[in-house]
Amino acid sequence: MFRNILLAGASVIALAGSAWAVTPVEEIKVDADLTAIKNPEAAKIFVNLPDDLTGAIASRLPPDSLVKDNGVKILVKVDTVELASTWANLADLSQSRLQGIVNVTEERNTGKSDHYDLSVSYPNATAFVPQGADVSVLTKDAGVYYTALISAFADHVVSNLK
């Protein structure tokens, strides 16, 4: 009985330790063809999208997980055509989304890679709107709206690291 309790306790400690383990990240790169955004309003808002999304992903990682070697590489390819068409046809904020393909690879271990499509819609991003902001009066050109989409996307990328 006592042996089973010790084994169960050791298993819980091992699982808890792995939950706290942080995937080392060597590189974060975001690609977006901003020239594909034909709407001038949208182009102004999304002009810093690659840098902003890269920074948002990095800011969600513990500082000790950013490494120079032997970490995973995160590449996000934003579907700017989707951004452009969503923006141009936007009837209301609830129809908007930020969409891209996320690749997470580890060069030293070629078997470890992750590839998935990620789409974050504005209703999912409302959790990132600052407290006190009135979401009923937000417009698509509000900085709060842009930041919320970036934040939601970055959170999903970091939470999917294995």
Image (cartoon, grey):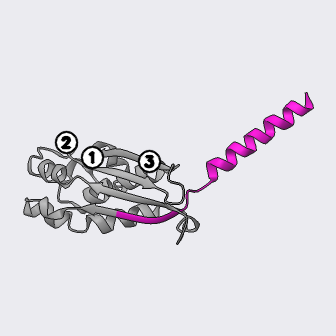
Gap in angstroms between the C-alphas marked 2 and 3: 28 Å
Residue 31 in the image: above or below residue 119: below
Give the labeled residue for mark 3: 114
Q: Write the residue at 29% across / 50% down.
A: 100
Regarding residue 131, the answer to whether it shows in the image is no
Q: Earlier in the sequence, mark 3 or mark 1?
A: 3
Asked if residue 62 is positioned above or below residue 17 in the image, the reply reads below
Residue at x 13% of width, y 64% of height? 35
Residue 27 in the magenta stretch? The answer is yes
- Residue in the picture at 10% in, 62% down: 41
Which secondary structure lies at badge 1? helix
Task: Say what amino acid the circle numbered 3 marks.
Answer: Asp
Q: CA distance from mark 3 to mark 1?
A: 25 Å
Label 2 and label 1: CA atoms lie apart by: 7 Å
Q: Which mark is residue 95?
A: 2
Left/right placement of residue 25 relative to residue 55 reads right
In the rendered image, residue 140, in percent from the top left (x then y), is placed at 18, 54
